[in-house]
Amino acid sequence: MAATSSVSIASLRQASSERRPTPSASGSFATPLFGGVRCKPPKLGSRMAVRCLAASSYVPPTVSETKLNFLKSYKRPIPSIYNNVLQELLVQHHLMRCKRTYQYDAVFALGFVTVFEQLMEGYPSNDDRDAIFRAYIQALNEDPEQYSQNYY
């Protein structure tokens, strides 16, 4: 978890009047108050603005947690020719899903289900194929029915 702290504007003004930033070799400024935080001011005569951003409280699951969720949901062995590609696809899907800009999209779901169907085309059992699909989507904390509706 990230810790946040607040600094009053008055203390910043007092500190900036007491300690002037000194230019480094790279042309940026290091202020002792901030312990080496480097920034380039827009103009030497203008005041520097300080932005404080609160850390997001949502922490996405790790890749290993997503893989573990998949393996907990589908406990049967998967032939290696399918398993290797399926695990790699799961990692890529997980990383894409963890981006802040990710939103479920029916076109993406259609593309994913099409790729999944082609990947699992020669799989020995249709029931296992459906169970793998459900476990895969649930491992990503999404709804398998929503993906299926956009495909069929």
Image: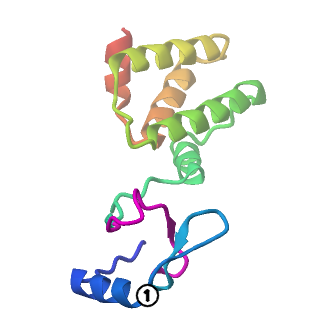
- On the image, the x and y values in percent for residue 97 come to 45, 38
Q: Is residue 50 above or below residue 8?
A: above
Q: Report which residue position mark 1 lands on.
A: 19
| Residue 9 appearing in the image | yes
Q: Residue at x 45, y 31 (%)?
A: 134
Q: Which residues are magenta?
A: 34-48
Residue 40 magenta: yes
Q: Is residue 61 above or below residue 19?
A: above
Which amino acid type is shown beneath numbered disc 1?
A: Arg
Q: Residue at x 60, y 39 (%)?
A: 91
Depth order, front residue of 69/59: 59
Residue 100 magenta: no
Q: Quadrant of residue 126?
A: top right
Q: Is label 1 in a helix, a strand or a loop?
A: loop
Task: Specify the quadrant that holds the C terminus.
Answer: top left
Depth order, front residue of 39/152: 39
Q: Is residue 95 left or right of residue 107?
A: right
Q: Is residue 56 left or right of residue 129?
A: left
Task: Specify the quadrant that holds the N terminus.
Answer: bottom left
- On the image, the x and y values in percent for residue 80 come to 77, 30
